[in-house]
Image (tube, helix red, strand yellow):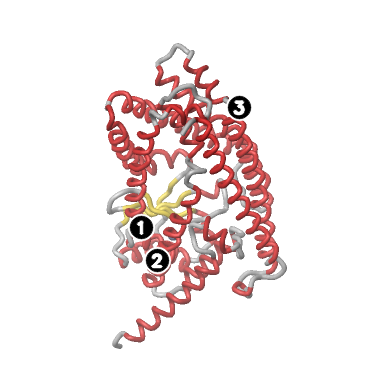
Amino acid sequence: MDAQGILVLYLVFFFLDLGWDYALSLLNLSHVRRNAAAVPPAFAGVVDAETHARSVRYTLTRGRFGMVSGAVSAAVVLAVVLSGLLGVLDGLFRSIPIHPYFQGILLVAAVSAIFSVVQLPFALYSTFVIEARFGFNRTTFGLWVLDLLKGLAISAVLGVPILLALYWFVDATGAWWWVWAFAAMTAFQLVMSVLAPLVIAPMFNKFTPLPEGALRDHILQLAERLRFRTRGIFVVDSSRRSRHSNAYFTGLGRAKRIVLFDTLVSSHTEEEILSVLAHEIGHEKRAHIRKGLAITVALSLVGFFILSLLLPWTPLYQAFGFSRPGTAALLVLLMFCSGPFTFFLQPLFTLRSRRQEYEADRFAVQGVGSAAGLRSALLRLGRDNLSNLTPHPLYSFFHYSHPTLAERLAALDRAEEDLRSQKALQPA
Ligand SMILES: [Zn+2]
């Protein structure tokens, strides 16, 4: 295939991706509008009309915003690809008298910067206009800028050595460079999964041990009962930035730290918090995290192999305006191509993720001995986050990593029924 053919193929996939995304979004928004008039029957009595009306407005606002920012991003991608700007930037950096590895770093940084700058006004509008209007935003402009600068610094500190290592592997380890690069990158990710919660997360938030008391005792009892080994329970001050609440674990290996958002602790009952934690423990006990890691590692091996095939393919570079092949140019092409050439695979991942959510919910019902806590926690989270109660089925099938609230509540009812029939079978 020549450069022209590659460009045409890319544009076909680019517009398929964009068109599919818009079709799904429009379908979803019109579905929400059709269900806007009254609280959906599945939520009658548990979600009031005022909250439902607000969630409809929030969903429509976010949906329209997503389409506008998506259109601008798409226009910038097209302009960059079709104008030959990538080749111009590459030539410019190659003319600077520094080591070629640093020329490559400048190229990757410059292209990343273009997209970050384009997205900046949208990120600001999202946080300080939309999220603020619906009462979600808690961050200040100063904190927002500080977060941005810290993020940039961390990207530079981690990204520059990664890029240097990658360039070196390609140059120095011959035809099997992709295996070496894959091994190094996987080792790096493992190290980061241990270091990130200890070094990076505290740069953004404060983690304090959960004070002694009933909640702490009951969490430890639950962990003990579910044979979950923990190395401490912490509360993170997530309310500095937003009202969204959650709980998670950090650390690798057997003993993990439990982290609770302060918003979860302050706005949920103890029964709800314990159920949410039991759900998270379910992910751990059903090996979802380990399986996910294994899939990521396998996919990254395939990814590096594909990159090794593409690396010397000159017409690919010419299609995007580069004059010749290069490792940095290949990384830039990866930024442009990975979305359009993989978007149709998304349901595979969301389907798997949703199945695991059902499993974790079922585990929590069994572990706590009732579905009541999780049911009220999910409803409270749905109300507090103004979740879309009526997404279009095709939209949620394609995009949702979690089942819809109505689907989860229905599955909880089934899990509770199973629990009851189990209890009935047990000898007294
Ligand atoms: Zn989950």
Secondary element at tag 1: helix
Residue 370 locus on image (x, y percent): 43, 75
Mark closest to the chain's N terminus, 2 or 3:
3
Q: CA distance from mark 1 to mark 2?
A: 10 Å
Other-residue count near label 3 (Cα within 10 Å), few / some / many at <14 / 14–19 / ≥20: few
Most distant residue in the bottom direction: 428
The reply to whether callout 1 and callout 2 are in contact (CB within 8 Å) is yes
Q: Residue at x 43, y 42 (%)?
A: 201
Q: Residue at x 60, y 55 (%)?
A: 24
Establish if 34 lies above or below 89. below
Mark closest to the chain's N terminus, 1 or 3:
3
Looking at the rendered structure, the kind of residue marked 3 is Ser
Q: What residue is shown with label 1?
A: 288
Residue 135 locus on image (x, y percent): 65, 53
Q: Which mark is residue 83?
A: 3
Front residue of 237 and 21: 21
Q: CA distance from mark 1 to mark 3?
A: 44 Å
Establish if 173 lies above or below 54. above
Other-residue count near label 1 (Cα within 10 Å), few / some / many at <14 / 14–19 / ≥20: some
Residue 67 locus on image (x, y percent): 65, 47
The reply to whether callout 2 and callout 3 are in contact (CB within 8 Å) is no
Secondary element at tag 2: helix
Q: What residue is shown with label 2?
A: 359
